Image (tube, rainbow, N blue to C red):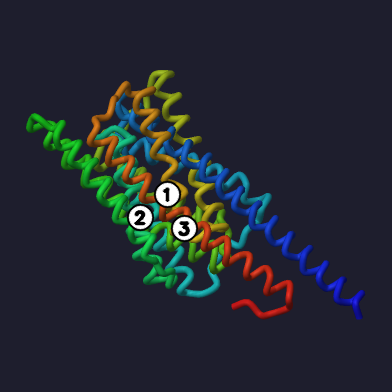
Amino acid sequence: MATTTTTDNREMTEGSSFSKTAVNLKSAASLVLAVSSAFLSALAAHFMALGSQAGVPGLQLIFLAKLAQLLCVLVVLPYFRPKLTAEDTLQWMILFLSAVISNLGTILAFMSFVYVAPGLAVGVIQGLIPLSTCCVGYIFLKERVGVIETGGILCSAIGVVLVAVGMAMEATTSTHVKQLSFAILLPLAAALSKGPKSVIARLLIGVQGVSVLTVALYARVLGTVLLLPGTYIFETPRWTMSPRTIGHVIGLCLCDTFSSLSIKFILKLEKAGVTAVLMTLVIPFAVLLDYLFQSHVHGYMELGGITLVMTGTAVVGGHSWWGHRQEICRNNLLKKLNFDVK
């Protein structure tokens, strides 16, 4: 009898240790993916700005990035062979909606880098994404937000307001005022679209088990098909470029491709709200690259707003990550004890 009890205790201890190890590895993978994705996103934003400053139209740059991503997905499809069809009509509709919102958010975000320093645009976008993500996440996934998360979200929102005020203080002429309108409205619209994008992608990848490559394929096909005629209708494409500009375009394509795939893998591991917060790491990278690539020094008001954004999202992220980690530990323990986990 004593031997049996000792064996059971040993099995429970080993199971608990295994569960903790699995959770730690999962958290480490999420963090590594988040850091790499954030850095690549910041680089892509600056390559977008540099390409636009070299005279390449914005929609054309986004089209080239989408085309490069589509080619990458098509290359790896034969190896991974994911299921490319939906389970039912509802999933077809969600896949199409995901593709539309994904492309809309990308266009709005990248076009904002044309009108404002990427560090500021990223600060506004990332500061509002947790708010839009949590709202949509509650509606579709029933992911509730507690008091601590609410405080962090409000802190981020105040930071966004300070960033906007800081940009307004620098708008001294009518030209600057017109540019300011685009600089504020485009990131705001991008944030409102990127929140639902994360939730829908989480629903497809993390909940319904749709392949990352399948979701990426639908979005890239739609974006490539629509952006090519769009750049001819709204812009004058420029296909002859200097070697330096070609390097910027290639950098944009590569960075945006791998950053986008990294985000989707994070969504497979983490909740939509946690993912949105992890991606706030893009802000310090973007601000640093503003100085290195654009020689742009931000004012105290803008830096204060960005600091509040990062503080608020860090509070939300830390609390959400801890709660998610405890939930995983609990579920693993219940599975080890042969209890049903719903």
| Residue highlighted by disc 1 | 314
Residue ID at (51%, 64%): 204
Residue ID at (42%, 40%): 282
Mark 2 or mark 3, which has the lower sequence index? 2
Q: Which amino acid type is shown beneath numbered disc 2? A: Gly
Relative to 40, does residue 274 appear above or below in the rendering? below
Residue 124 can be seen, yes or no: yes
Q: Residues within 10 Å of mark 2 (few under 14, many from 20)?
A: many
Q: Which amino acid type is shown beneath numbered disc 3? A: His
Q: Residues within 10 Å of mark 3 (few under 14, many from 20)?
A: some
Taking depth in this image into account, of 220 and 31 the one nearest to the observer is 31
Residue 319 marker = 3
| Residue highlighted by disc 2 | 152
State the residue lying farthest toward the front: 2
Taking depth in this image into account, of 5 and 104 the one nearest to the observer is 5
Residue contact between numbered discs 1 and 2, judged by CB atoms under 8 Å: yes
